[in-house]
Amino acid sequence: MPSSAKILLIEDDAETCAEIAGALGERGYAVQDQATGTGGLDAARHGQFDLLIVDRMLPELDGLAVIETLRAEQVRTPVLVLSALSAVDDRIRGLKAGGDDYLTKPFAIGELAARIEALLRRPVETRATALHVGPLSLDLIDRKARRGERVIDLLPREFKLLEYLMRRPDQVVTRDMMLEDVWNYRFLPQTNLVDVHIGKLRRKIDAPGETPLIRGVRGAGFVLVSGTEDSRPPADR
Amino acid sequence: MRAPEIFRTTSFHIAAASAGVFALGVLLLFAFVYWQTAARETGTVDRFVERQVARFAAAQPGELIRDLTLSEVRQEQHIAYAALFDGTGHPIAGNLGALPPDFPVDGHAHGATLAEDRLVRAAAAKLSDGRVVFIARDVAELNQLQRIVRRALLLGAIPALLLALAAGALLSWRELRRVRVVHRSVARILQGNLSERLPARNAADDFDRLAIAVNRMLDEIERLLEEIRGVGDNIAHDLRTPLTRVRARLERIRDAPRSDKELEEAIDVAVSGLDQTIGIITALLRIAEIEGGNRRAAFGEIDLARIVHDVAELYGPIAENAGIELAVAAEPRRIKGDRDLLFEAVANVLDNALKFAPRNSRIDLAVIDGPEGPIVRVRDRGPGIPPEERQQVLKRFYRADKSRTLPGSGLGLGVVSAVMALHRFRIAIGDAQPGCRFDLICAPFPAD
């Protein structure tokens, strides 16, 4: 986990701000906060930040205006937009203004942390023709998956799901992220669909007696571990 | 009644305008009558005097003088003046001393004023021996007729105008009275008495039609408010249940501190309870967003079969886990719509079927052709939905009592309903004997 990354949090609600800053601090991030749009813009211009977390609605200067101004000034720091507005239009507007991801309030801290991690690790390498994570290897040309020497027989969507995880080794990915990126549908499933798919994938990857490679992370999602040592954050399975 | 208010009413304006038009019409009519009587009567008189002059001119000299002298003849012929003058203008016979000055002697009728200001139409003709015969007829009667016409105009039109304005005022006053009643009703409605209605007689005039339309609108508002109240109760119930659980659990664990593991468990229960409430709120907002209809702009061409196959692929493992066979049959069918929303609708219908289908049964997911357009049909072998509950299940929050314990926000089919309404598509729920048949009836692609 890339700890000590510097994050600027622009959020006007003091309590929310303290909660988020506290949770991110525990995860090893250095968080600085600002309560207004103008203050945030000023801080973002002068401080060297790895990531900006910007609330949509801010006093003095709207969150989207802050992002637009920064992007116009060629500041390319990744931005995660937070908002109490959940309409699709709002999300599109947030991304259009130059936000890299959009998270609707209320959210699980795990979801926020996973998305921050994803933004800090960007960009994902896409030119490789083969991926290797621990004992797993994925041939993107032959569309073949292996664990050690054993060939794993995967359906096309399972292949895509595994590829998604293997491009993000040791990184927590949430259910929402997978629905959006692997299935390309934005909707509210009434059932824990992703868990069922992950469960199926797990059964194919982990033969009886083998170390489980995909682990659940409570309150967040799943992580594909690259090492075999058990040093991951608390797993629920 | 305040005078200015009545003058501002629409009916008074209409009355005033029609009174104005009426007055103009009367004026034109009278002008016509006046012109007709004057011109026609003058013409008749003119032809008469011309004929008389011609007759005298052609008569034997003796007879001429006798006729001119005899007043009986004059009276009989309604001739006011008849006279014969010699070549130099001296009177020879008749009752006129001299020709009017500059009177043309051409056998044609002309107007003239004689002694004592008598208005006449007269004609003069020259005889073959140079003498001049003059005939005049009184037009006093004609003038009197014209005076009568003028008086009739004054006596008739002015009261008619006043009457029209008075009628307008009366109508306006009645309208004002009705407007006031409506105002009072609206005031009561604004105070929260939503069962109040505007008074409407059965006369079906404009005012009544308006009142009936407003009343219908009030019916709809009242119904919606009732529904919101009902939804509010349901929200309260669905939110309160997990929140109560969360609260009880947290209080219990605070009062009697236990092991870390128990503490952790209690917190997990609390978080999942809160997640459930958040899920309900999010789903509600989502339905509101879909119903807002802004998304119609984003409609594009989509293939129903593709959506159905994607949904089946997504839910396949779930069906598998539940021991349910998911049978898919879908040929490409183009429609116009929002891909994500239709995916969600089909997913929610299938999700619902999966929740009710018994183990080791089969669910059919198909795209078929119906008379209205392509249909996405989901058929399960579950308990089915009784006919009286089929409309209810599409409403927000409705959940058959038996399903209260199942996970989900209870809004899945509410979302389906909102998505279909946005697309102006239709939902039909039928009995598959056994099981439920859920049809999403789409409209064919516009160009087809």
Image: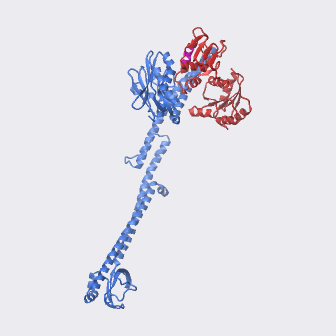
Chain colours: A red, B blue
Residue B379: x, y in percent?
Answer: 42, 22
Along the viewing direction, whichever of A192 and B385 lies nearer the viewer? A192
Residue B158: x, y in percent?
Answer: 41, 66
Q: In the rendered picture of this protein, how many numbered marks are placed on residues?
A: 0
Tell me if I can see residue B230 in this picture: no
Residue A120: x, y in percent?
Answer: 67, 25
Residue B57: x, y in percent?
Answer: 29, 85
Quadrant where the image shows the C terminus of chain B: top left
Along the viewing direction, whichever of A68 and A150 lies nearer the viewer? A150
Q: Residue at x 57, y 8 (%)?
A: A208
On screen, residue A64 versus residue B371, left or right, reads: right
Tell me if I can see residue A40 in this picture: yes
Residue A130 on the magenta span: no
Q: Residue A180 appears in which quarter of the rendering? A: top right
Residue A200 on the magenta span: yes
Along the viewing direction, whichever of A82 and A139 lies nearer the viewer? A139
Q: Residue at x 50, y 21 (%)?
A: B313
Along the viewing direction, whichever of A140 and A6 lies nearer the viewer? A140
Q: Main secondary structure of the magenta part?
A: helix
Magenta part of the protein: which range?
Answer: A196-202
Q: Residue furthest top?
A: A209
Decide: is A121 above or below B24: above
On screen, residue A10 versus residue B144, left or right, reads: right
